[in-house]
Image (tube, rainbow, N blue to C red):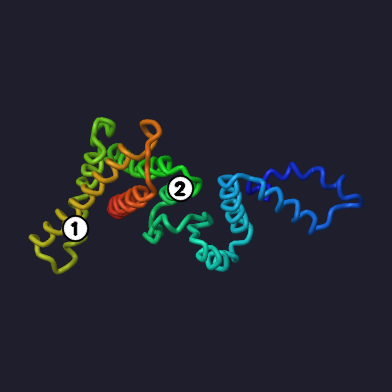
Amino acid sequence: MGAAGLPIHELAHLQQSFHGGTSKGQLMDAIEELFFNLSQTEKNRVVSYCIEEILNRKSSLKEDLEQVLERVGWGISGNEPYPLDLQMDIDTSELPEEMHNEVKKVLKRFRDGDITGAMTSICGAVDSLTEDVYQTYDLGDHRDASYQERVAKSIDVFEVEYKRTLEETNLSDRQINIFWQNHRGSVNQAGYVLGACRREFSDVHGEQNSSSIFVKRALDCAVFIIRTIISLM
């Protein structure tokens, strides 16, 4: 409970209060009282970190915990609990560890009520990826490009590789070109949506008013962009 953020130092008086020692029941009663004296925000944070600490120590409990949490509108990604109103059934299993960590950061900030911070984390993952592409393929200074342009130029460098993978199919050259143009256009449009969310609903330029629905949309766009580019690298 201490590792989960409960201020258990406030229970230091128990040993003296309960003459002759403290029983497990007395300790649990004191912890319960301490927990219920927290604010709602602090309660949410302690519960979330408690779940994470439990799974860090005993991962075999994950399936049972998921069943219990689902009843109250929560799920688990990795060892991180998250509210189910943040759509997370998108497949991130093939993303690199660095990108997994970015998604975990999004979940943590969203969970703690930092909606604009969650939006910034989502965009930051795509920022890092496109910066790597710019540097690797000598595309110039990524800071001089608009957000959508960065995404579009990053996917454009993989046109040859993208079409090469399709040449192994029975598609004609015309079909391959149409396939590429539509997929490239989808990534480009996802970049626009993500850039607009970053501009209007993140905390990059100071505190912004945001809604959880935009975090969900931005996360969908970001994972689509990241998965597409990484699959070609």
Residue 137 visible within the image: yes
How crowded pointer 1 is (Cα within 10 Å; few <14, some 14-19, many 20+) is rated as few
Residue 80 is situated, as x and y percent measured from the top left of the image, at 52, 54
Q: Describe residue 128's horizontal placement relative to residue 41 as left or right.
A: left
Amino acid identity at mark 1: Arg
The disc, 2 or 1, on the residue closer to the chain's N-terminal end is 2
Amino acid identity at mark 2: Phe
Q: Describe residue 116's horizontal placement relative to residue 189 as left or right.
A: right
Residues at marks 2 and 1, CA–CA distance in whole angstroms: 39 Å
Local SS, label 1: helix
The answer to which of 61 and 67 lies nearer the viewer is 67
The answer to which of 166 and 213 lies nearer the viewer is 213
The residue tagged 2 is: 110
Q: Is residue 166 above or below residue 210?
A: below
Q: Is residue 156 above or below residue 208?
A: below
- Which residue occupies 79% across, 59% down? 25
Q: Is residue 109 above or below residue 166?
A: above
The residue tagged 1 is: 164
- Which residue occupies 69% across, 43% down? 7
Residue 76 is situated, as x and y percent measured from the top left of the image, at 50, 59
Residue 145 is situated, as x and y percent measured from the top left of the image, at 23, 34
Q: Which mark is residue 68?
A: none
Q: Describe residue 178's horizontal placement relative to residue 209 as left or right.
A: left
Q: Describe residue 213's horizontal placement relative to residue 62 as left or right.
A: left
Judged by depth in the image, the label closer to the viewer, 2 or 1, is 2
Q: Identify the residue at the far right of this view.
A: 20
Figure quadrant of residue 198? top left
How crowded pointer 2 is (Cα within 10 Å; few <14, some 14-19, many 20+) is rated as many
Residue 98 is situated, as x and y percent measured from the top left of the image, at 43, 47
- Which residue occupies 82% across, 43% down? 13
